[in-house]
Image (cartoon, rainbow, N blue to C red):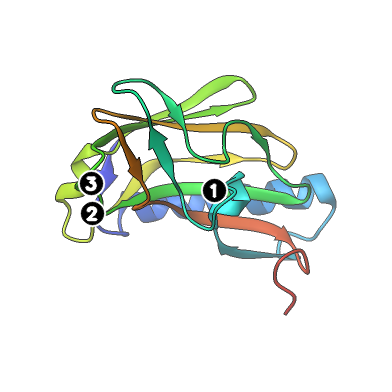
Amino acid sequence: MVFYPEFKGVALAAYNQGIDKLKSKMSREIGLAVDGGIIRPVRPEDLGSTYPWWQLNQVATNTWTAFVGCTTDTIADNRFVLINGVYFNGDDGELHQVRITREQSVTRYWVVTPIRGFVSRTGYADDPWTVDQNTVITIEGICSSVSTLTDFDFIGAVAEKRGILINP
């Protein structure tokens, strides 16, 4: 797994493959035509956050801590999520890794420390992960200091049936 500072090349190809996968799953599982749904940017609420931003309250050093509102959440019906990167503007909190558990199995460990050194503070992954409708997910981070982190965002897309969030 590598994070790229620009959304091109390998990172863009991985994203496009992920979008095709979401469209295919949406078509197969809810019976829509491949282009029958919409693709929109991911929001924290799509992955269970109770805030419109990601927040991690690290209360002990070097322990896995769930992001606020994401202790364990189930993805909404008729919604498929792709996460292909992160934005991390943090100097404080020293978030080092993010762990994603899907259906009680660890899906990804992402080391996010290098992203702070990117000019855009955004890293695009060559191994995006997806979460299907009605899937249980937990998102955790690990910091080397006690703090509250609110300057972190997942980047990605959501495929869903028209009218759930956006009604064109």
Determine the secondary structure under disc 1: strand
Q: Which residue is mark 1?
A: 82
Q: Which residue is mark 2?
A: 5
Classify residue 130 by image quadrant: top right
Q: For the residue carrying disc 1, how many other residues have a C-alpha within 10 Å: few (<14), some (14-19), or many (20+)?
A: many
Q: Nearer the viewer, mark 1 or mark 3?
A: 3
* Above or below, comparing residue 35 to residue 91 in the picture: below
Determine the secondary structure under disc 2: loop
> Mark 1 or 3 closer to N-term?
1
For the point 22% across and 61% down, the residue is 120
Classify residue 8 by image quadrant: bottom left
Nearest to the observer: residue 107 or residue 138:
138
Q: Quadrant of the N terminus?
A: top left
Q: Which residue is mark 3?
A: 115
Q: Give the residue type that dot 2 points to.
A: Pro
Do callouts 1 and 3 mark residues in contact (Cβ within 8 Å)? no
Question: Could you tell me residue 129's position as x and y percent?
Answer: 50, 39
Gap in angstroms between the C-alphas marked 3 and 2: 8 Å
Q: Give the residue type that dot 1 points to.
A: Leu
For the point 41% across and 37% down, the residue is 57
